[in-house]
Amino acid sequence: MSRSKTIYDKIWDDHLINTNDDGTSLIYIDRHLVHEVTSPQAFEGLRMTNRKVRCPEKTLAVVDHNVPTTDRKNGISDEESRIQVETLEKNCSEFGIEYFNELDLRQGIVHVVGPEQGFTLPGTTIMCGDSHTSTHGAFGSLAMGIGTSEVEHILATQTLIQRKAKNFKVNVGGTAPKGVTAKDIILSIIGEIGAGGGTGSVIEYTGKAISDLSVEGRMTVCNMSIEGGARAGLIGPDEKTFAYIKDRPRAPKGEEFERAVEYWNALNSDKDAYFDREVYLDAAKLPPVVTWGTSPEDVVSINGEVPNPDLIDDESRKETKKSALKYMDLVPGTKIKDIKLDVVFIGSCTNGRIEDLREVAKVVEGHHVNENLNAMIVPGSGLVKEQAISEGLDKIFMAAGFEWREPGCSMCLAMNPDKLLPGQRCASTSNRNFEGRQGFRGRTHLVSPAMAAAAAIAGHFVDVREFTK
Amino acid sequence: MEKFKNLTAVSAPLPDINIDTDKIIPKQYLKTIQRTGLGKGLFSELRYNDDGSENKDFVLNKSQYRNAKILVAGDNFGCGSSREHAPWALLDYGIKVVISTSFADIFYNNCFKNGMLPIVLDEKEVSLLMEETERGSNATLTVDLESQEITTSDGNVINFKIDKFLKHCLLNGLDDIALTLEKNADIKNFEDDVKSQRPWL
């Protein structure tokens, strides 16, 4: 009998082409997502070496990072952004790759689009030149972010050279209290293991609190695996996964779907599978959380206060956290609820899906955005936007004083015109609070959509559990 | 890809932990469609003041580190975004070796695709080299890939580990796409098998 395996072991084995004596392996890539920022140099590399795209039909391209979120009918005014977008369009047409441009209803953030189209399937290897590719792990796929040289490698060969990572189990038991969302769970995990805690590992999220999540909530969890340093994050597929996939444009149909489900069901980790490391969290004890610093590991309860770095023993950690507080213009002991905000950003591949928008609508309906603050909502895709409109959410947002925008990455990384001004403080549903991430000298606090929505109304952080009472 | 065999150069200290790729190369520089010319954006939010002048306090602006080709950095260097613009910017500036207690996986991989050598050492060894860097241009480090040794100017020798395949590619400046294309028959066989086993793909 063969040994027990994790889901990662199984996907790895089913994609292994060969392994050298030193453990270097060639693995097959089933799905390749491409966007405008990390691909131009890869296509240029193909041209210079006279190589073709091996499997254009396994590749899907969409523009997301650079696109403005205001009216696009007149094109993109920033010249460099426009050139990058046009370059992707030209490359896709030259190499025969399907491409969703900025006027296509299906356009959106690459990690929202893949699942929406049924391009993302359990048991597949999915790569993209973007670190948040880990999102697709929510379907029980092996999904990893890669650099541009590896994008070129996949375009040319449909394979990647890799070494197998370690298996890391993060077990989240218990039932998450009301107001504690997928975002609070993953931020709490990162707070626990640290920004480099998952380095060299593929995390499998298990436990009741994970099974309880919707597929979209699972995407939020897997999305931020990279913020814990993991190579990828994944969740074993179940009936919720299959129901989400069924009837999507690129999903298998009819008998083929049934056959696929049989294979997908068998992917789940064997009961006695070996993990190199395991961590347990009790979801019942988690509060809604907020980040206070410039690393996603800087997590604190909404009812907590800014910590004192002087209490840290390790010298370089202490100095790093002190400079983070200086950058954030915060002093130890400040109550999180006393932190006032200038901007609220709701969107991104972490929290830009329809369920996120429904959560926001629930909180803000009948209220108005605080007069000292600008708040914007950027749907993750054109289809998310269309769905929100059909449910009347857009009317709730606009009545509450939110700006309601066109889909894209937007202020998550501020490559388009949506940026914080120097010194502005933002509650953001995105994934990174790095220095300058949302705009030069901008200050970011990461939160869930419900917490961002409540903060937008109050003008400062509030405990969403009290707010909705 | 350029070969990497050995390097003797000044090393600069960046003791902060979790130095992310947004910090190494901020997003405004990612709009390029080239691999070159990114050195000007390297650490730009730390290197320059708001008026565009140089920030004298930043390590690479100090006279003794201007010619640094080696960085000794805090834990989890290169975390965050997968942008290969980070190693491109370091390389364009002239930095070919980064030494730390750990690197983010994607950044680590990206270095090897560009003829750069990231070296992982234990905490004690990194602290020793961090101290060494404080002597600036009065002290250089020699990094030899073949023998997997770092030699300080005092003659201290530190050994480092590296994956055999990555070392081979770096020493010989190999293009790994060409290496993979030699296995085309294996890839084709794999694709044929999948067609029958998982026809929905």
Image (spheres, coloured by chain):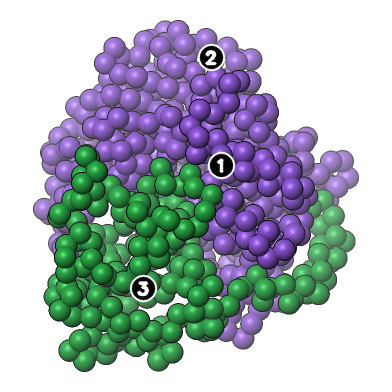
- State the residue at coordinates (74%, 50%): A95
Q: Identity of the amino acid at label 2?
A: Asp
Dot 2: within a 10 Å radius of its alpha carbon, few (fewer than 14), some, or many (20 or more) residues?
many
- Rendered shade, chain B: green
Q: Which chain hosts label 1?
A: A
- Residue A339 badge: none
Q: Are marks 1 and 2 on the same chain?
A: yes
Q: Identity of the amino acid at label 1?
A: Gln
Q: Is A141 drawn above or below residue A28 in the view shown?
A: above
Q: Position of residue B112 (x, y in %)?
A: 49, 71
Which type of secondary structure does the marked residue at label 2 adopt? helix
- State the residue at coordinates (33%, 31%): A420
Q: Position of residue B22 (x, y in %)?
A: 37, 49
- Residue B97 badge: 3
The residue under label 1 is A84
Which type of secondary structure does the marked residue at label 3 adopt? strand
Discs 3/1, front = 1
Q: Is residue A191 left or right of residue B152?
A: right
Q: In the rendered structure, are the residues bearing label 1 and label 2 in contact, judged by CB atoms less than 8 Å apart? A: no
Chain corresponding to purple in the figure: A
Is residue A126 or residue A215 the one in the foreground? A126
Q: Position of residue B91 (x, y in %)?
A: 40, 65
Q: Is residue A149 left or right of residue A115?
A: left
Is residue A231 or residue B85 the one in the foreground? B85
- State the residue at coordinates (14%, 75%): B135
Q: Quadrant of residue A218?
A: top right
The residue under label 2 is A394
Q: Are marks 3 and 2 on the same chain?
A: no
Which type of secondary structure does the marked residue at label 1 adopt? helix
Q: Identity of the amino acid at label 3?
A: Val
